[in-house]
């Protein structure tokens, strides 16, 4: 086998198998990074809210302070519910984006493989 054929086979192997695998891994790593960052952001927001609530509770010194604290809890609960909804929407959006991009990648790879197979059958 000569060097030209070996280089051509290596290139075909890379185009057919390795390049699509690298592209899918890149997509997967990007998706994982976005999901981890979203989870870390949400976790920090919930933790900060919890700590702020504990600090606020520590400042309660009388019945009026307790009443005020309890009233503020309705707003906190509302904000947390809105945050949770926003976080869930973000995760769904990231998942949909990943699915669409991976489907497109798969379609492109199938087309490329069909084209390569067609060329190989014509030269054979």
Image (cartoon, helix red, strand yellow):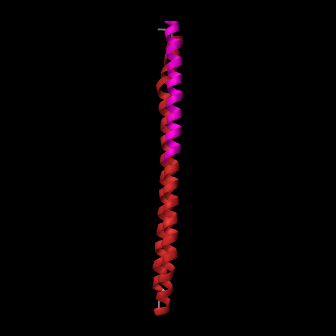
Residue at horizontal 48%, vertical 80%?
55
Q: Is residue 72 above or below residue 28?
A: below
Q: Name the residue furthest top.
A: 124
Q: Where is residue 15 in the image (x, y as percent from the top left)?
A: 52, 24
Examine the structure image and report whether residue 31 is included in the region drawn in magenta.
no
**Residue extending furthest bottom?**
62
- Number of callouts in the render? 0
Which is nearer the eye, 47 or 4? 47
* 106 drawn magenta: yes
Q: Is residue 20 above or below residue 119?
A: below
Q: Is residue 63 above or below residue 31?
A: below
Residue 62 visible from this viewpoint = no
Q: Which residue is depicted at the point 51% across and 45% down?
A: 96
Q: Position of residue 59 (x, y in %)?
A: 49, 86
The residue drawn where x is 48% and y is 87% is 67
| Percent x, y of residue 121 | 49, 9
Can residue 91 be seen here? yes
Residue at 53% in and 23% down = 111
Q: Nearer the viewer, residue 110 or 37?
A: 110
Across and down, in percent, residue 76 comes to: 50, 74
| 49 shown above or below 43 | below
Main SS category, magenta section: helix
Q: In the image, which residues are magenta?
A: 95-124
């Amino acid at each position: 086998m000569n060097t030209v054929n070996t280089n051509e086979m290596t290139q075909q192997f890379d185009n057919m198998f390795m390049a699509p695998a690298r592209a899918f891994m890149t997509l997967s790593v990007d998706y994982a990074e976005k999901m981890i960052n979203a989870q870390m952001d949400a976790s920090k927001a919930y933790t900060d809210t919890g700590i702020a609530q504990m600090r606020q509770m520590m400042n309660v010194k009388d019945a009026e302070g307790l009443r005020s604290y309890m009233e503020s809890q309705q707003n906190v609960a509302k904000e947390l519910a809105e945050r949770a909804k926003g976080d869930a929407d973000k995760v769904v959006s990231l998942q949909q984006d990943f699915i669409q991009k991976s489907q497109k990648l798969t379609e492109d790879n199938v087309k490329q493989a069909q084209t390569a197979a067609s060329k190989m059958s014509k030269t054979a």
